[in-house]
Image (cartoon, helix red, strand yellow):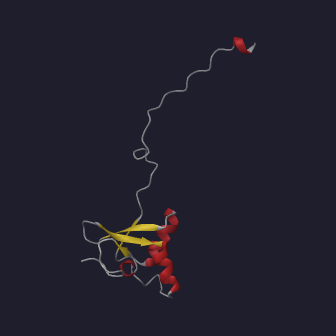
């Protein structure tokens, strides 16, 4: 059979295009609370392959109150702090304008 005699290739079945945000292939952002240990944040950053985590309030609203970064964790470790003892609110970069190291009111 020559190439000219071959039947055309069948069309692939059409699938609906699903946007990436609803396709289920994105993980929700990793978060921690202000009272979690810095070691927990370091573990989550490694697992989530990210350099920052959103920090949530411990109240039932769970509103975002700041960010903890890998640099914050590294700085604490370099200062000799025990990451299993220090709490995130002592390290995080606060987005609400509160002084560094102090949780917002």
- Split into 4 quadrants, where in the image is the N terminus? top right
Vertical placement of residue 20 versus 6, above or below: below
Give x and y (percent) for residue 21: 41, 47
| Residue sitting farthest toward the top | 5
Q: Which residue lies at the image location 36% right of the left edge and 78% below the top edge?
A: 89
Residue 51 placement (x, y as % from top left): 49, 67
Instruction: Say whether residue 80 is left or right of residue 34.
Output: right
Q: Tell me what residue is drawn at x 41 percent, y 78 percent.
A: 37
Whether residue 98 is situated above or below residue 81 in the rendered picture = above
Q: Where is residue 61, by image quadrant?
A: bottom left
User: Is 36 on the left or on the right of 70, as rendered?
Assistant: left
Please tell me which residue lies in front, 38 or 92.
Answer: 92
Q: Residue lying at the far right in this picture: please name it.
A: 1
Count of residue discs? 0
Q: Is residue 77 above or below residue 59?
A: below
Q: Nearer the viewer, residue 1 or 67?
A: 67
Q: Position of residue 58 (x, y in %)?
A: 29, 72
Looking at the image, is 51 positioned above or below residue 22? below
Closer to the camera in the image, 96 or 41: 96
Residue closest to the far bottom: 80
Quarter residue 2 falls in: top right
Quarter in which the C terminus is drawn = bottom left
* Residue 27: % across, % down: 44, 55
Q: Which residue is found at the position 42% from the left and 41% from the top? A: 19
């Amino acid at each position: 059979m020559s190439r000219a005699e071959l039947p055309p290739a069948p069309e692939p079945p059409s699938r609906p295009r699903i946007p990436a945000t609803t396709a289920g292939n994105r993980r929700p952002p990793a978060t921690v609370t202000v009272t979690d240990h810095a070691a927990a944040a370091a573990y989550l950053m490694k697992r989530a392959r990210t350099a920052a985590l959103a920090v949530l309030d411990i109240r039932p609203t769970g509103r975002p109150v700041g960010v903890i970064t890998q640099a914050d964790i590294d700085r604490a470790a370099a200062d000799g702090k025990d990451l299993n003892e220090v709490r995130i609110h002592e390290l995080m970069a606060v987005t609400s304008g509160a002084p560094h190291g102090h949780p917002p009111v």
